[in-house]
Image (spheres, rainbow, N blue to C red):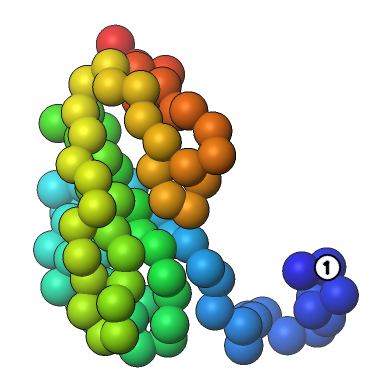
Amino acid sequence: MPHLIDAESYFDVSPQWVCEVLSPSTARIDRVKKLPIYAREKVDHVWLIHPVDKTLEVYLRIENSWTLLNACAGDDVIRAAPFDAIEIDLGLLWSD
C-alpha cells in the first residue's frame, strides 16, 4: 500500500488479515473489544496467538460474526487462511 502513504497517520482501507499476540494484560481487550471492531470494519481473517499457551486460533468473518476455522498448538504444521498456500511450522514461533 505504498501509494496510500502520505502525511496522514492512518489508513482508511481495512486490512484483510489481522494477527493479535495475546498477553495476560491484553487478551480481554483483543477478544472483547477489538474483534467486534474488526468485524465492523470488514477485516476477513483474524489470528489470535497465545505465546505462553503456544496456541493459534484462526477466525473467519462471516457477516458480523467470527467463525473459528482452526485451533492449533505446539509444534503443529498448519495451512491457515488466508495463507493456506503455504505450510507454517508453529514450533518456530515459540521461544524456549
Q: Can you see residue 49?
A: yes
List the residue tagged with mark 1: 2
Q: As shown in the figure, which amino acid type bears the numbered disc 1?
A: Pro
Count of picture labels = 1
Residue situated furthest front in the rendering: 85
Image position, residue 54 (x, y; %): 21, 29
Tell me if 10 is positioned left or right of 53 in this view.
right
Residue pictured at 48% horizontal, 42% vertical? 84
Image position, residue 67 (x, y; %): 20, 65
Secondary element type, mark 1: helix
In terms of image quadrants, where is residue 66? Answer: bottom left
Query: Which quadrant would the N terminus be assigned to in this image?
Result: bottom right
Residue pictured at 22% horizontal, 34% vertical? 72
Q: Can you see residue 50?
A: no
Residue pictured at 20% horizontal, 28% vertical? 73
Residue pictured at 36% horizontal, 30% vertical? 78
Image position, residue 35 (x, y; %): 26, 73
Residue situated furthest right in the rendering: 3
Image position, residue 82 (x, y; %): 48, 53
- From the viewer's perspective, is residue 86 above or below residue 62? above
Residue situated furthest top in the rendering: 96
Query: Which quadrant would the C terminus be assigned to in this image?
Result: top left
